[in-house]
Amino acid sequence: MAPGPVKYGPFEYAPSPAHPTAFSLLHRNKPTLCAGCHEFRTASGFPALTTYSEWKAGPYPAQGVSCQDCHMALVLGDTARKEVKTRQEGSYRFINLHRLVGGGSLGQLRRALDLRLVAADVRDEGGYVEVEIVNTAAGHKVPTGLPSKQLLLSVRALSEDGRETFAESRIYERQVLDDRGAPIRSDGEIFLTAAKVVSDNRLAPGEKRREIFRFPIRPGTVKAEITLAYRYRPPGAAAPTLQKIAQEVRDLRRR
Ligand code: HEC
Ligand code: HEC
């Protein structure tokens, strides 16, 4: 990091009327640029943020797919120098999107994950739902980054009038404790006192996960509703943010 008036980028010749520019090899589609912030060890050496190493351990480096390929897609856009525009067709050219969208965008989440309903049925007094969730397009684990980001898979059985006769949720997350073995109390503590991983059941790049939910059939149950959602729940925050990624509904009445 070198804060100041000079703007660095991947082009060797890119003068700007607004500020000095300089070429930087690091910016040339290099994941190490992102690793500077998206890979972090605490002072005592605990790997607090591991997005870069999750990417490194997955299939994407071998395919030449870097962070920027997914997060800085080519879009039509405006450039600072007019002559650059006019030399291209029309008045726009392709530029790399700098918005860096991730879990904050429902579009990215829907692209990243697939929810497939494999089977749902009733046998004797019991019902069951089998689903598969797939990390189809994230270059690292889902969720990645702060441990307060979670993936939530919920199954509900419902009666005709919408009454809940069964509900169960499974959570995919990386659970972390501090150096005294206590739960982390804020997102900030991740960078300071995080010391131990208790569990990690997040989805690796490309991974498919099958889950079976079994439940007793209570009178009036007619359907099952399966929901995959992304939850950001910083410890201590009043209410979590929840984004619904996908939902499936299946009729459970016998034909
Ligand atoms: C100087 C530090 C820094 C660098 C370098 C950096 N990031 Fe980030 N990035 C952050 C921080 C801090 C956040 C969290 C912001 C928030 O959650 O509000 C973030 C968030 C993100 C998000 C999530 C946005 C969302 O929708 O939630 C994505 C995606 C991302 N960065 C991708 C990248 C990529 C790709 C690179 C390399 C080209 C990169 N970042 C380089 C600091 C950095
Ligand atoms: C194959 C495409 C792909 C690659 C490669 C990739 N990402 Fe992502 N990334 C995604 C998608 C899709 C999401 C949205 C789903 C999610 O949040 O996990 C995402 C989410 C994120 C988030 C947001 C997590 C949050 O808080 O919700 C960050 C930060 C991020 N990526 C950083 C990186 C960095 C750094 C790299 C390189 C080391 C990288 N990504 C490589 C596709 C990719």
Image (cartoon, rainbow, N blue to C red):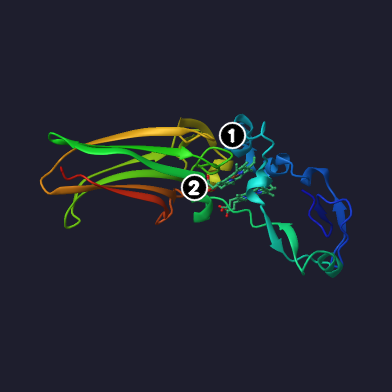
* Residue 159 locus on image (x, y percent): 17, 52
Proximity of marks 2 and 1: CB atoms separated by less than 8 Å: no
Callout 2: 10 Å neighbours few (<14), some, many (20+)?
some
Q: How many residues crowd around disc 1 within 10 Å: few (fewer than 14), some, or many (20 or more)? A: some
| Disc 2 residue type (three-letter) | Ser
Picture quarter with the C terminus: top left
- SS for callout 1: helix
Left or right: 194 in relation to 62: left
Residue on which disc 1 sits? 54
Where residue 206 appears, as percent x and y from the top left, is 52, 35
Q: Which residue is mark 2?
A: 186
The part of the image, by quadrant, that contains residue 173 is top left
Of residues 92 and 154, the one drawn nearer to the viewer in this rendering: 92
* Nearer to me, 67 or 252: 252
- Amino acid carrying label 1: it is Glu
The answer to whether residue 61 is seen in the rendering is yes
* Residue 163 position by quadrant: bottom left
Determine if residue 97 is in view.
no
Ligand 1 lies under 8 Å from the Cβ of mark 2? no
* Residue at 49 percent of width and 31 percent of height: 197
Q: Is residue 116 left or right of residue 84?
A: left
As drawn, is 247 to the left or to the right of 218?
right
Location of residue 94 in the rendering, given as x and y in whole percent from the top left corner = 73, 59
Where does the image place residue 40, in percent across and percent down from the top left? 63, 38
Classify residue 75 by image quadrant: bottom right
Instruction: Residue at the far left: name it.
Output: 219
Residue at mark 1: C-beta within 8 A of ligand 2 = yes
